[in-house]
Each structure stands twice: as structure tokens, then as C-alpha cells.
Amino acid sequence: MENHHTVLITGANRGLGLEAVKQYASAGWQVIATCRTPKTATELGQLAQENPSVSVYQLDINDLESITLLAKQLDQQAIDLLWCNAGVYGPKGIGLGEITADTWMDTLKTNTVAPLLLVQQFLPHIRRSQLKTIALMTSKMGSMEDNTSGGSYIYRSSKAGLNAVGKSLAEDLRSESIKVALLHPGWVKTDMGGPSALIDVTTSISGLRQVIKSLTLENSGSFYAYDGQEIPW
Ligand code: NDP
């Protein structure tokens, strides 16, 4: 039964993360909605007030202490789906010749390193769940084959790195029946995607939920878009 399941979502205060909270709550799931600053997360706070199945927790994915604290707080809990959604684009409009190590490192930390640290801390919670699923929000921009326009060094490399992380997790955890989904949400109208994007958050998240639902141990570690199409590496 869907409604016995629990999902933990990072970056749940806006954009795709907030929409994922709404859809899973409507489907009857318990939702652990995490964000950097719950105090200013007005819409999420309102949602939690109206819906007892949504609980809000503070989590900055770049802060290992914050991850460890949350893992302890949720100690005996089973987490069916760990959805690592939070991410940053990094500095915009920076081209070849302008890239610095510091700005690159900041983006890599959030998009590539933090999701793995999160998975490491929450493996016990995933192991004790029924669905045993990890979803990593990556991007088609991390695909080599799809890269015909160059540029976006920082974002592209951070998501390509996340793809490598997800593939290894899928291989390592298959024997424990833990599945890993590598997800491209489409080009979506959010603060990151901007107003000219092609689809809205509702379409993206309902598609991604279907992709996650259809995931098997055999295709764990594959890279899928919100419409179910497999994306080449
Ligand atoms: P938004 O910019 O709208 O939202 C990003 C979310 O990530 C915010 O909730 C933000 O929190 C959170 N976040 C960033 N850094 C941290 C951190 N250190 N700790 C906790 N939370 C953090 O982006 P989208 O909703 O569009 O994107 C969600 C995911 O989808 C990202 O991983 C993105 O790369 C990916 N994606 C998006 C696409 C699009 O077209 N929109 C296309 C391809 C991939 P805060 O409000 O505190 O900043």
C-alpha cells in the first residue's frame, strides 16, 4: 500500500522539491521535507500545518553535522525513498578562462559530494524500509553524448560526477535489494530552470514518480528522464 511509505526529500522548500512534497502527501505518504531554513519556508510550513503527514526538518546538505543530526533524530525510522533533490546551478555566465577552483568546488560539494554523504548516513533507514529506493536528481547536462554545445563546465561536471556516484551505488547496493534512480526532471519552470523552460513542476514530478515506481533491481542505476526515456551517458 502506497500510504504506508515514507519519503525524505532535500531542498523541499521550493521548485521541484516542494512539488514532490505536495504530490507524495496527496498520495498518502509520510513526507519528511527538509530544507536549509524552515523559518522562511512559508509555503512548505503552510503545507505541513494543513497536512499531518508532512513534517519539516532543517537540513543543509553541505553541513555534515546537520546530516548526522537528522539521521539521529530519525533514528528508528524506515525511509522507503531518499530523494536527493537539492542542487545548485553554480555561477552563471562564467565561460572558459573565467572559472576558479573555489566556485567549482562549491558546486561540486552540493551537487556531487553531498548526495553521497547523505546516502551514507541514511543507509540504515533505507535498509529497514519496504521500497528501499534512492533517487538522485541529476541532469541531462551531465550526459556526455547529449553535450553538443559545450560550456557549463561547472554544472555539467557536477552532474556527470553524480551520475558516476549513482551508478556505483546501484552496483554496490543491488545485493541488498536497494534500487537507485538517476533522474533528469526535464527543463522545468523553477527558479533554476527559469520562465522559458518547457514544462511545469507538476508534469515533471508526476512523471518522475512514475519512473521511480517502475524502477526494478535490473534497471537500477539507469539514467531516466521524467517521461520515462532512458538518457545516454
Ligand atoms: P531550485 O533552484 O528551484 O531549487 C533548488 C533547491 O535546492 C532549493 O530548495 C534550495 O534551497 C536547495 N538547496 C540548494 N543548496 C542546498 C543546500 N546546501 N542544502 C539544502 N538545500 C539546498 O531548483 P529546481 O527545483 O529546479 O531543481 C531541483 C533539482 O533538479 C536540482 O538538483 C537541479 O540541478 C535539478 N534539475 C533541474 C532542472 C530544471 O530545469 N529546473 C533541470 C535539470 C536538473 P534554498 O531555497 O535554501 O536555496
Image (cartoon, rainbow, N blue to C red):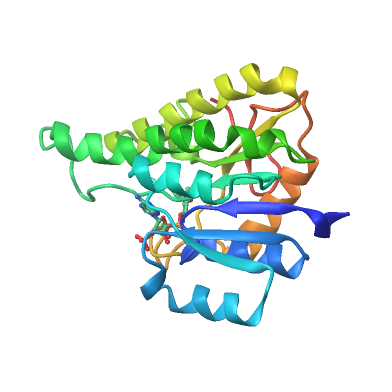
**Front in this rendered view, residue 198 or 167:** 167
What percent of the width, then of the height, locates residue 231?
60, 33
The N terminus appears in which quarter of the rendering?
Answer: bottom right
User: Along the line of sight, which residue is nearer the eye, 147 or 125?
Assistant: 125
Using the image, determine if residue 232 lies above or below residue 54.
above
Drawn side of residue 225 relative to residue 178, left or right: left
Q: Is residue 157 above or below residue 191?
A: above
Residue drawn at point x = 40 percent, y = 38 percent: 114
Q: Is residue 108 left or right of residue 215?
A: left
The structure residue drawn at horizontal position 23% and vertical position 36%, both measured from the top left corner, is 104
| Mark count | 0
Query: From this viewpoint, is residue 71 visible?
Result: yes
Q: Is residue 210 left or right of residue 37?
A: right
Report if residue 200 is visible in the image. Answer: no
Q: Position of residue 184 (x, y in %)?
A: 56, 44
Q: Residue at x 58, y 27 (%)?
A: 232
Near-viewer residue (166 or 210): 166
Residue 174 vertical placement versus 123 (above, below): above
Quadrant of residue 157 in the image? top left
Outermost residue, right side:
1
**Which quadrant of the render holds ligand 1?**
bottom left
> How far across and down, in percent of the image, does residue 124 sit?
63, 34
In the rendered view, tell whether residue 59 sits above or below residue 228.
Answer: below
In percent of width and height, residue 36 lies at 37, 59
- Residue at 56 percent across and 50 percent down: it is 185
